[in-house]
Amino acid sequence: MFNKNQQQVLKQADLRLNTLTETQLFQYLGNKELENLSNAQLVELLIISNALYRSGESLISDDDYDFVWMAELKKREPQHQLLNQVEAEPVASSKTVTLPQKMLSTDKAYRLEEIERWLKRIEKSALELNKPLESLIFRITPKLDGYAAYDDGKKLYTRGDGVKGTDITRVFERGLQVAAQGKRGLGAGEIVISKRYFTDYLASKFDNSRNFQASIIKEKELSPYAEDAIKSGAAVFFPFAILPDWKGDSIELLTDFESIIKDIWHQTDYEVDGVVLEVTDTDIKARMGATRHHHRWQIAYKKNLATAEVIVLAVTPQTSRSGRITPVAELEPVRLSGALLQRATVHHYKMVIDKGIGEGAIIELARSGEVIPKIEKVLKPAATKIPKNCPSCKHELIWDGDFLMCTNKLDCPAQLTNTMEYFFKTLGNNDGFGSATIAKLYTSGMTNIKAVYQLNVNNFKDIGFGEKQSANLIEQLNRSRTEEIEDWRFLAAFGVFRLGRGNSEKLLSHYPLELLFGLTEEEIINVEGFAEKTAKLVVNGLANIKPLFDNIYALNFNLQMSTLEIIQEKEKLILAGKTLVFTGTMQQSSRDEMKKKAKALGAKVASTVSGKTDWLIIGEKVGATKINAAKEKAVIIMTEQEYLHTIKN
């Protein structure tokens, strides 16, 4: 049963058992009876375990959490929100606030070959900027395993989901110092504890250093252990900007890779779970940019831990929120680095066919610092079975590239719960509608977002929520409608396949929200980044969600509308029908500004020269790659001045 401290943590975080009893929870944790858990119960078990772990009151080990329970969720729901988000630190009674700067995750590599491919991508960007790879300087730092936070000089924030966190400035007010006598306001970093201090004074009181780090930010009075660690300077906030580092060029990096990594790995007296590599050139950083998940100019390197040859017992299909059918290889149990592994996710059914991953196949399995074990290679292929119908709703499946898809989005049971949770998570302006809450609503008959917004306080109480929690949930529903959010975030929250945040933002920079549902495939294809197949999926997806969208949109959400880059009468624009590529350093304005203006004049702007390119506009310091490609494809080449003169006249 929960001890008093664990009960207090759950009470403060407003978490309670809904689909499990306390006895059932501990029985499952002790016996690992995965097959008997429903999806909702599994999610609840993970949320409860994570909250207690990050509050210093662990129920289970890190290995069991990562490689047993999270692995099971990955098997069942590979696109579940818990697997694709930063695991937020539960700070009791703290309202989420927008971070001063996004705290993105870091892309990961586990082999030198992956680092080499990353360097190739940097080299490509360097050539486009006429900079030789040998001239670039790289920085390598330890990857601290602490409690992520952001310091803007006035406040300290938890990382939260990377966009919204919570204010924990109180830890500085309690005496926490910046490491290495650093100053405030250095941005992202980690709250960490000295390994030596932890071993000498805290190891008998806390399971691991992360549990102790979580205790430092608690709202209530600190324990004597935390106070002593802060006063002694053993617990600190370590900004990434002042971490010890190695700097050098790519040749040095590749020539002496292992020794450099080994040296940096042991540079600090804090827990480290890898190293971070980044290119320091600001032009390259700007050129490469970022995904919504990580910076392309940065990568973390982690070491492989173990591999084993394993027999595949079966391959089972799992339906994700987006409708993708993910194959999961059921394995002959094998223990790697202390964790018992029984499943591994296969990327898609095309890989199942190509590699021969079926019953009786022998694979090489690796546990390499990832949450889920990875199939390294197939040593002995076997006959495969490809499902024709969705395992959840029995709807006929279709192929979309390498993936099998269930398009029955509104009626597929496996997609409904995650769809609701995804909606509230993507909005990002509400609290309380996490997995446990959504699971409880779903079991009470709430199968869509509209139904949730129609609830009142008494309805929530009838479902089984407490009086205070019911009032809070209604408050958060109202907050989600009244607090301003971007229109592209609102659109993305409906989970249309191929219409995530990035594509939603692109589309709404060309067409207002009210007109989206009437767009043709041709009109969407004219927007950069939308190919023919994507446009078709988007049109069909928008048609499927329109009834729900209309109902939710009618609730009068406070939407910040995107600025349109192209007016609707495109045929009247002077660059309508032209495809342009800009390269080199521009003098009159930045390249991004020139691209934006070209789009406003009706042009389609691409990043690479192809047979569809009409004009290549060149500035200064241009590499030969694009110019040669333009000549080969008979593309018109203009200088910046020639281009400006052309559009002016």
Image: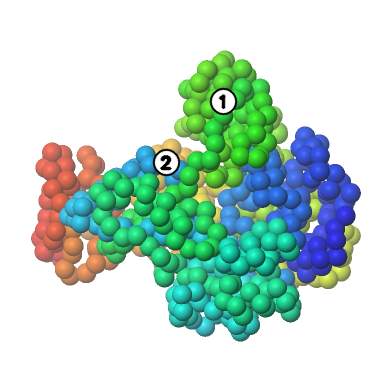
Q: Position of residue 270 (x, y in %)?
A: 53, 63
Q: Quadrant of the C terminus?
A: bottom left
How crowded pointer 2 is (Cα within 10 Å; few <14, some 14-19, many 20+) is rated as few
Q: Could you tell which of marks 2 and 1 lies nearer the N-terminus?
A: 2
Q: How many marks?
A: 2
What element does badge 1 sit on?
Answer: strand
Q: Position of residue 523 (x, y in %)?
A: 39, 48
Q: Residue at image x 46%, y 79%?
A: 181
Give the farthest residue toward the top. Answer: 383
How crowded pointer 1 is (Cα within 10 Å; few <14, some 14-19, many 20+) is rated as some
Nearer to us in this view, 153 or 207: 207
**Residue 419 shows up from this direction:** no
Q: Gap in Å between the C-alphas at discs 2 and 1? A: 19 Å
* Residue to which mark 1 is pinned: 309
Q: Position of residue 574 (x, y in %)?
A: 22, 58
Nearer to us in this view, 26 or 535: 26
- Disc 2 marks a residue whose amino acid type is Arg
- Disc 1 marks a residue whose amino acid type is Glu
Q: Where on the picture, by quarter, is residue 426?
A: bottom right
Question: Is 337 located above or below residue 144 in the figure?
Answer: above
What element does badge 2 sit on?
Answer: loop
Whether residue 15 sits left or right of residue 622 in the image: it is right
Question: Is 175 located above or below residue 237 in the figure?
Answer: below
Q: Quadrant of the N terminus?
A: bottom right
* Residue to which mark 2 is pinned: 111
Whether residue 426 sits left or right of residue 411 in the image: it is left
Q: Residue at image x 60%, y 25%?
A: 310
Q: Residue at image x 64%, y 62%?
A: 199
**Residue 27 shows up from this direction:** yes
